[in-house]
Amino acid sequence: MQGLRNIFRKSWSSAERLDGKTVLITGANSGIGKETAIDLAKRGAKVIMACRDMDRAQAAVKDVIESSGNQNVVCMKLDLAEGKSIREFAEAVNQGEPRLDILINNAGVMMCPYGKTADGFEMQIGINHFGHFLLTHLLLDLIKRSAPARIVTVSSMAHSWSSINLDDINSEKSYDKKKAYSQSKLANVLFTRSLAQRLKGTGVTAYSLHPGVVQTELWRHLGGPEQFFLTIAKPFTKNSAQGAQTTIYCAVEPSLEKESGGYYSDCAPASCSAAGRDDVLAQKLWELSCQLLSVTWE
């Protein structure tokens, strides 16, 4: 069905400008993050590309400037697998930037072999959820001061493949890379839902999304049968530019200004799984995240 929708869907486009606004995108040196950076730079925004590999980031900055014609594009080092790096990065942004209008939590890892972040989190939940949870927390005051502002978190339809194991969030008892990925993407949806509740009345809105089945480097950890299936499915998948459209839609579409907490796909509201709408689970995950990261949200 998704494939057929991709072929027949009417593409979304908008002439919305972002002059004078600042956008921060994690994982922006390749794939949909880079395509998002190009599009938002074309709209006149200052774009901060937050990346782990600075050599690749600097090359990507050149590409974004060249493609967009906007010189106001910079890269900054951010390793979402390390709390210390996240805190140093956030401090530099808070001190150096007068405003932050759009935060795009885009970086992610997918179905990787078992590993842990510097802070002891399983890699997928650590980068995809905990890293972005902490980053958003540390930048929130700046974002609120810039309102109306938006926080966009890239999830996936994979959020519906499993639930969240609050008793073994780091998959220490057993590890299934697909379930751990699904858990981290469900965490993105629940985080957005909880965030929207907490931001009511601030002028800051939050969105999560499924970009589509996109041909990106995230596929590198997939096994032989999965790679074969994706090769067969390739005509129904999206390239990075197409995959970035729903992120861009959530970042700039004027009609979403009063919407918050929802889940989107193909530049339109979409239905998420029952677990993704579970406010009790969302609250428990929120409390566990605060506890494990030693943070307090006002």
Image: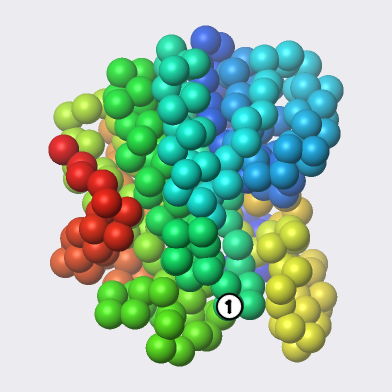
Q: Secondary structure at mark 1?
A: loop
The image shows residue 293 at horizontal and vertical percentages of 32, 54
The image shows residue 142 at horizontal and vertical percentages of 35, 23
Count how many numbered circles sit on residues in the image: 1
Question: Looking at the rendering, which quadrant does residue 220 occupy?
Answer: bottom right
> Which residue shows up at 38% across the image and 46% down it?
134
> Which residue shows up at 61% across the image and 24% down it?
47
In screen coordinates, is 36 left or right of 66? Answer: left
> Which residue shows up at 16% across the image and 38% down it?
298
> Which residue shows up at 28% across the image and 80% down it?
167
Q: Dividing the image into 4 quarters, which one contains the N terminus? A: bottom right
Residue nearest the viewer, comparing 291 with 100:
291
- Can residue 98 be seen here? yes
**Callout 1: 10 Å neighbours few (<14), some, many (20+)?**
some
Question: Looking at the rendering, which quadrant does residue 273 occupy?
Answer: bottom left
- Can residue 17 be seen here? no
- Check disc 1 and give the amino acid type: Tyr
Residue nearest the viewer, comparing 27 with 89:
89
Question: Looking at the rendering, which quadrant does residue 206 occupy?
Answer: top left
Q: Quickly name the residue at label 1.
A: 114
The image shows residue 159 at horizontal and vertical percentages of 44, 69
Figure coloring: rainbow
Q: Considering only vertical position in the picture, is 215 above or below 86?
A: below
